[in-house]
Image (cartoon, rainbow, N blue to C red):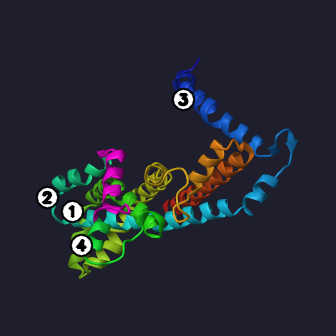
């Protein structure tokens, strides 16, 4: 046996436990879920479960809210994190302190965060108490469009620190010669950012987007802790729909919704992977 073949066999043996775990806990359950989405009981119905979902008001509401949250919260998180990292990159002596400070929300337990928000924003909370003392009507934060703003704020606040560290590391790897040459040529600060810094940290931007996408689908725990199983129509997400159908034992609808959610995530990620590969090819 040649040395190269022995290395391939050794690598395969090391990868075998991980591949077996992926097969048992991900691939096989996904196939079972897809097959189950094609049946109602023991009756094969094909794509009827998928068709009925898009005529279901609850599902379309969850899909709309998830889309609104995704297209609003992820760009907002990335823009705010990038601007903060630019600021920290200009003051390197203070950057270590601020990077540590921005990581504090990551380690704060969700339960503690929820208690604070309930004390502040519930019907008889601190803010409504202050409004009542001024003779102003109370605001139903937990049963109005303010609830979506609250979830977006929690998402950005909690994950901003991690994204700032990633952006700061990417900016630190840009050679100073590029920036100094641009300044000697009379480039403005805006052009340095848009023509030098952003193109040079494109892989970092792509990775931050992937992490932000993953974090956005974990926001369900905050929604569940704040609003319960059945939140108001402004923050009823696909994760709520899937979870409620699980409790109701409606497995065909649950399976179909899970497949649609996974296809949506994979499609978005594939588009950005293709854009990243095209950018690398053009370079």
Please tell me which residue is depicted at 40% across the width and 63% down the height of the picture: 150
Tell me which label, 1 or 2, sits earlier in the chain.
1
Tell me which label, 2 or 4, sits earlier in the chain.
2
Determine whether 72 is above or below 108 in the image. Answer: below
Mark 3 in CB contact with mark 4 (< 8 angstroms):
no
Q: CA distance from mark 3 to mark 1?
A: 39 Å
Q: Which mark is residue 18?
A: 3
Eye-nearest disc, 2 or 4: 2
- Element on which disc 1 rests: helix
Q: CA distance from mark 2 to mark 3?
A: 42 Å
- Element on which disc 2 rests: helix
- Which quadrant of the view contains residue 270? bottom right
- Element on which disc 3 rests: helix
Determine whether 244 is above or below 70 in the image. Answer: above
**Span colored in magenta:** 107-126
Q: Left of 110 or right of it: where is 270?
A: right
Q: Which residue is mark 4?
A: 181
Q: CA distance from mark 3 to mark 4?
A: 47 Å
């Amino acid at each position: 046996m040649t040395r190269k073949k022995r290395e391939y066999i050794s690598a395969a043996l090391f990868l075998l436990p991980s591949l077996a775990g992926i097969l048992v806990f991900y691939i096989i359950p996904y196939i079972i879920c897809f097959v189950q989405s094609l049946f109602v009981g023991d009756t094969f119905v094909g794509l009827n479960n998928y068709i009925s979902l898009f005529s279901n008001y609850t599902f379309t509401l969850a899909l709309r809210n998830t889309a609104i949250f995704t297209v609003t919260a992820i760009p907002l998180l990335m823009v705010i994190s990038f601007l903060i990292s630019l600021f920290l990159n200009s003051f390197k002596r203070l950057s270590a302190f601020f990077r540590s400070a921005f990581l504090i929300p990551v380690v704060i337990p969700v339960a503690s965060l929820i208690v604070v928000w309930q004390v502040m924003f519930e019907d008889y909370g601190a803010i409504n108490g202050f409004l009542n003392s001024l003779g102003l009507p109370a605001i139903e934060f937990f049963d109005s469009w303010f609830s979506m703003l609250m979830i977006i704020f929690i998402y950005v606040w909690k994950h901003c620190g991690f994204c700032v560290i990633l952006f700061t590391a990417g900016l630190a790897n840009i050679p100073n010669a590029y920036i100094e040459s641009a300044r000697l040529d009379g480039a403005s600060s805006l052009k340095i950012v848009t023509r030098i810094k952003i193109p040079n940290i494109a892989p970092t931007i792509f990775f931050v987007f992937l992490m932000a996408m993953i974090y956005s689908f974990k926001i369900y725990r905050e929604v569940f802790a704040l609003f319960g199983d059945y939140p108001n129509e402004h923050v009823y997400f696909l994760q709520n729909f899937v979870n409620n159908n699980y409790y109701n034992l409606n497995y065909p609808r649950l399976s179909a919704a899970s497949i649609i959610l996974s296809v949506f995530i994979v499609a978005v990620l594939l588009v950005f992977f293709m854009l990243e590969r095209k950018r690398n090819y053009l370079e």
